[in-house]
Image: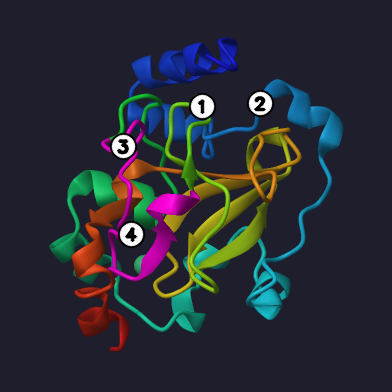
Amino acid sequence: MRFPSFPTVIRTLYTLGNSTARRLFPAAGPAPPPRLASATLPLRAGPSIPFLGALFGSSARKTDMEYPVKKSNEEWRAVLSPEQFRVLRTAGTEAPFSGEYDKHMPSGGTYNCAGCSAPLYTASQKFKSGCGWPAFFDTVPGAVVRHEDSTFGMVRTEIVCANCGGHLGHVFKGEGYPTPTDERHCVNSVSLKFAPEDKKGEDGAKESKA
Ligand SMILES: [Zn+2]
């Protein structure tokens, strides 16, 4: 494992119970590895939709007005599982090494948003990071929006679905992974729904064009 101490910390948080942990540490995990502290370069907003990053602070999630797919919390609860709602709509985090797609390495296909089915990442953009969550080095163009997240005593870059604003996780840069971008999109499995190649983006068309 690449960073042995961090999952231990997170597991400890989880033993407090999710609600307690969230109250104490509203942005607990996925967190950067320790050495990121020496490289807290403020990441710029994603190149695809730069103005969104400028408009929104870390509280952007609470004002979902700018996303094409708009639903009330009640509407989201009706279509999401409780765990999906907690992660996607309240910026929760699944326990490390627990997610359905952590070790999922298909040869093709797409990882779509579990909230609105928009295609977010392709199988060829996934890599093994050992961090305990699915890791991607790039996204479907324009599919993911970045926000600076300064909660939890550190500056991180939150990533959300550009279509519905659903919380995906965080993105880290300059960690030294041998990928084309040297970025790690650390995404909760519960925020994703894998679609095999032949179904690529299919059910995304219905809801995302609302
Ligand atoms: Zn979405």
- Who's the residue at 40% across and 27% down the image? 20
Asked if marks 2 and 1 touch (Cβ < 8 Å), the reply is: yes
Which residue is label 4 attached to? 110
- Who's the residue at 61% across and 47% down the image? 171
For the residues labelled 3 and 4, the Cα–Cα distance comes to 12 Å
Q: Secondary structure at mark 2?
A: loop
Which residue is label 2 attached to? 33
Under mark 2, the amino acid is Pro
Q: Which residues are magenta?
A: 100-125
* Other-residue count near label 2 (Cα within 10 Å), few / some / many at <14 / 14–19 / ≥20: some
For the residues labelled 1 and 3, the Cα–Cα distance comes to 13 Å
Give whichever of discs 2 and 1 has the lower sequence position: 2
The mark lying in front, picked from 2 and 3, is 3
When the figure is inspected, residue 33 is found, relative to residue 199, above or below; the finding is above
Give whichever of discs 3 and 4 has the lower sequence position: 3
Ligand 1: image quarter: bottom left
* Other-residue count near label 1 (Cα within 10 Å), few / some / many at <14 / 14–19 / ≥20: many
Asked if marks 3 and 4 touch (Cβ < 8 Å), the reply is: no
Under mark 1, the amino acid is Cys
When the figure is inspected, residue 38 is found, relative to residue 51, above or below; the finding is above
Which residue is label 3 attached to? 104
Q: What mark, if any, has residue 131 been given in the picture?
A: 1
The mark lying in front, picked from 1 and 4, is 4
Asked if marks 1 and 4 touch (Cβ < 8 Å), the reply is: no
Task: Report which quarter residue 51 is drawn in.
Answer: bottom right
Q: Position of residue 142 (x, y in %)?
A: 54, 74
- Who's the residue at 84% across and 36% down the image? 39
* Other-residue count near label 4 (Cα within 10 Å), few / some / many at <14 / 14–19 / ≥20: many
Residue 77 in the figure: left or right of residue 5: left
The mark lying in front, picked from 4 and 2, is 4
